[in-house]
Amino acid sequence: MRIGIIGAGNIGGNLTRRLTALGHDVAVANSRGPHTLRELAEETGATPVRAEEAARGAEVVVVAVPLKAVPDLPPGLFDEAAEGVAVIDTGNYYPRQRDGRIAGIEDENLTESRWTERRIGHAVIKAFNGTYAQDILDRHRPAGAPGRMALPVAGDDEAAKRKTRSLIDELGFDTVDAGGIDDSWRQQPGTPVYGMRGDSEAVTRALADASPARTPDFRG
Ligand SMILES: NC(=O)c1ccc[n+]([C@@H]2O[C@H](COP(=O)([O-])OP(=O)(O)OC[C@H]3O[C@@H](n4cnc5c(N)ncnc54)[C@H](OP(=O)(O)O)[C@@H]3O)[C@@H](O)[C@H]2O)c1
């Protein structure tokens, strides 16, 4: 499958590694340009591209940039993507350490992914946001393996959610349907499921135990 990855850091880099290893045709972009991605390209066989080109022909696009960089992404990013493209948002809001205060999220009480959708002009599927980047390399297991880790997946586009869940299964993890984007506060930073390494049952319980109030650490 043709997959575009925007952001080649911890999470985008490791998704590039695993998705190429599975045989997918991956185009990867960062902010500094393709010439800075030569090493990753040599290591993985992914094609380094400019962010503008990453979604071209892609059935899945992963947005893995810091939240504060989302408004800098080029306009019309998904214009040449494949029909029905699933756009996966890995983002988290870290107002204190990284992103600064984002008024849309705090004052309008939007979920982080709803805010991102409005900036990029496309529906997203929220996935991988609470998964340690290293776990993508180290903790994948075949389907049915005991203790296989599960990831929560939220989104309003059911077809895109199905496609995302099937790709995550291929990557070696179970998934739990975490509802729509308005429900995705249940998997944001500070919630019980965030950073959790549990199976489907544990993830389902953690999602149910979440509180909608943003914890002080994650308020700007
Ligand atoms: N680290 C984790 O374990 C982890 C796990 C789950 C989710 N997340 C979330 O995923 C997001 C990315 O985290 P990360 O740790 O992977 O970040 P990171 O290591 O800092 O990497 C960020 C990447 O985004 C690129 N980027 C920044 N601005 C861009 C722009 N305008 N256009 C294109 N690319 C741009 C950077 O490119 P340059 O280097 O060229 O600037 C870099 O490749 C964050 O919201 C984070 O909270 C992280």
Image: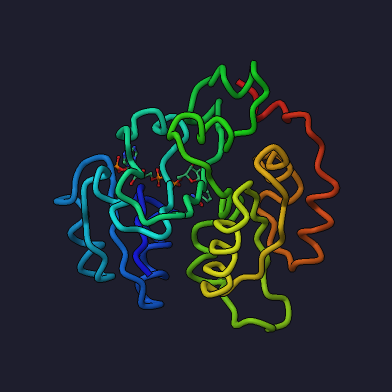
Spot the residue most to the left: 35
In the picture, which quadrant includes the N terminus? bottom left
- Residue 151 screen position, x and y as percent: 65, 60
Q: In this view, does 142 lie above or below 48?
A: below
Position of residue 97 measured from the top left corner of the image (x, y, whole percent): 52, 30
Residue 162 appears left or right of 61: right
Point 53% across, 75% down: residue: 170
- State whether residue 46 is above or below residue 64: below
Q: In this view, does 88 lie above or below 112?
A: below
Which part of the image, by quadrant, shows the C terminus? top right
Residue at the (64%, 16%) spot, across then down = 107
- Residue 117 pos. (x, y %): 51, 35
Q: Which of 27 and 149 is in front in this view?
A: 27
Identify the residue at image location x=60%, y=83%.
142
**Residue 7, image x, y percentages:** 36, 47
Which quadrant of the structure image shows residue 168? Answer: bottom right
Q: Quadrant of ligand 1?
A: top left
* Residue 68 vs residue 23, the one in the foreground: 23
State the count of labels: 0
Residue situated in front as seen by the camera: 62 or 217 = 62
Residue projecting furthest to the front: 83
Pick the front one: 83 or 20:
83
